[in-house]
Image: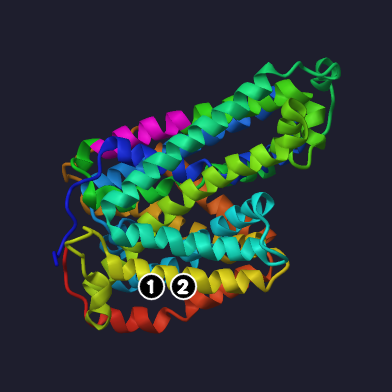
């Protein structure tokens, strides 16, 4: 056994994780919703560019935090150093029981729903496929960091190829006759709501923080990954939305209920749904593997700091990974899959369950950058966020708005998620009594 991770994550690995986590099923669901809340094609495309800018702002803020405090615990480490052990332990509990495991579960449901279209397994086929995917990819990552990285690179490349094929299909499709008149149509204009959908589609980039403790040179690599990952994701999102506009026109895009499936059906007929299911399965598995890989790092950081759960803080030398943490994370994610299977829509239930908790702690992480700057004004920093304090202030406002939106628009699942977080308060209070400074 080793007490710390080895430095094996390269810039290419980091970019693959960013692409794998961010580019998911959202890009096949959200564009019609964004179009319905924007007044023109130009504003529609600008909304997606603005989403890329918001992602860049967030990744630059995280680059400063991770370069100054590289650690496999990622946000846990930032919150611990900024606010103390109690809040950090509560965050680790929230991430382990709600945020990350909920994300694993809802991505698994996305995969399950589409895998069931390719190979049906009965009335509960989607849930069965979801559970199988969690088990298989947890097993891959338990085997070691290298299998997890290779799997991620494979699915990230497969996703890019598949999405580029969808983009090409849209760009080569003859534009509809009604397209010329679509720019003159009115309606929409609810840009704030449109940006909620856009930013949800860009979500997940913050997971790169959990790779900082294993990066070969986090002081330089975080910035490179932030810039390259944001550029690739933004280019893909703008291109695919331009392809949607070319294929359907603005009004046709607004009217579409399943824009990806509609596009593939136009291009290749009835086989389109099957091809899209394969594309989305690739994207979902890429996101699933990356989410499992990064998620276990928070368990490891918590177990490293709290003696009562020290087995979670063991770094396995053979696999160069937190194997025990992977197993616990997989068990909780499977329990959430079972819970989601009992609801009408497992995906929506998991989104409601995770969203408010996620944005609350992301808001605290954004504010922590100001805390570090105020506490250590003269400290030298490996990387400084450009245009401080404007850049992190915008990041704080984005997080605050999405926290409000997630509370306003989610259902009972959100209250359940908040209640599960509250159950971790005794652990946070107890854990602070055993605090030991490992900064």
Within the magenta stretch, is there residue 224? yes
Which sits in the foreground, 236 or 274? 274
Q: Is residue 361 above or below residue 336?
A: above
Q: Residues within 10 Å of mark 2 (few under 14, many from 20)?
A: some
Tell me residue 289's x, y (percent).
Answer: 43, 52
Element type at marker 2? helix
Element assignment for label 1: helix
Q: Residue at x 52, y 63 (%)?
A: 132
Q: Majority secondary structure of the magenta segment?
A: helix
Q: Is residue 407 visible?
A: no
Q: Is residue 68 left or right of residue 291?
A: left
Q: Quadrant of residue 381?
A: top left
Residue contact at pointers 1 and 2, CB within 8 angstroms: yes
Is residue 336 part of the magenta span, yes or no?
A: no
Residue 87, image x and y in percent?
36, 70
Q: Which residue is mark 1?
A: 328
Give the spatial CA distance, label 1 vs label 2.
Answer: 6 Å
Left or right of 57 on screen, residue 169: right
Which numbered tag is attached to residue 262?
none
The label on residue 332 is: 2
Q: Given the current orientation, which residue lies at the most extreme left position?
A: 2
Please provide the residue range marked out in magenta. Answer: 221-232
């Amino acid at each position: 056994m080793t007490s710390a991770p080895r430095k094996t994550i390269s810039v290419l690995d980091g970019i693959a994780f960013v692409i794998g986590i961010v580019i998911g099923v959202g890009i096949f669901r959200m564009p019609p919703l964004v179009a319905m809340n924007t007044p023109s094609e130009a504003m529609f495309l600008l909304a997606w560019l603005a989403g890329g800018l918001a992602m860049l702002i967030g990744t630059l803020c995280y680059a400063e935090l991770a370069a100054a405090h590289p650690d496999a615990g990622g946000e846990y480490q930032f919150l611990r150093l900024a606010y103390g052990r109690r809040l950090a332990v509560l965050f680790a509990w929230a991430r382990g029981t709600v945020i990350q495991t909920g994300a694993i579960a809802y991505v698994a449901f996305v995969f399950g729903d589409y895998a069931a279209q390719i190979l049906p397994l009965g009335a509960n086929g989607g849930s069965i496929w979801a559970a199988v995917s969690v088990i298989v990819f947890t097993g891959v990552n338990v085997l070691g960091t290298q299998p997890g990285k290779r799997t991620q690179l494979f699915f990230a490349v497969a996703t890019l190829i598949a999405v580029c094929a969808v983009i090409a299909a849209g760009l080569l499709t003859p534009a509809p006759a009604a397209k010329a008149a679509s720019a003159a149509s009115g309606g929409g204009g609810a840009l704030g709501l449109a940006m909620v959908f856009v930013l949800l589609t860009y979500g997940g980039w913050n997971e790169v923080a959990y790779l900082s403790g294993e990066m070969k040179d986090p002081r330089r690599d975080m910035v490179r990954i932030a810039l390259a990952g944001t550029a690739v994701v933004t280019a893909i999102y703008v291109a695919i939305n331009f392809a949607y506009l070319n294929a359907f026109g603005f009004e046709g895009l607004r009217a579409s209920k399943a824009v990806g499936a509609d596009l593939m059906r136009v291009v290749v007929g009835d086989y389109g749904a099957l091809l899209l299911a394969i594309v989305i399965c690739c994207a979902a598995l890429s996101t699933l593997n990356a989410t499992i890989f990064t998620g276990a790092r928070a368990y490891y950081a918590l177990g490293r700091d709290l003696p009562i759960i020290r087995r979670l803080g063991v770094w396995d030398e053979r696999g160069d990974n937190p194997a025990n943490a992977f197993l616990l994370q997989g068990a909780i994610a499977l329990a959430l899959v079972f819970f989601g299977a009992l609801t009408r829509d497992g995906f929506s239930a998991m989104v409601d369950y995770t969203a408010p908790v996620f944005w609350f702690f992301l808001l605290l992480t954004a504010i922590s950058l100001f805390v570090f700057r105020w506490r250590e004004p003269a400290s030298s920093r490996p990387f400084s966020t450009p245009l401080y304090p404007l850049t992190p202030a915008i990041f704080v406002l984005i997080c605050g708005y999405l926290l409000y939106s997630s509370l306003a628009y989610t259902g009972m699942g959100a209250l359940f998620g908040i209640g599960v977080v509250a159950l971790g308060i005794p652990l946070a209070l107890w854990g602070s009594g055993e605090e030991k400074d490992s900064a």
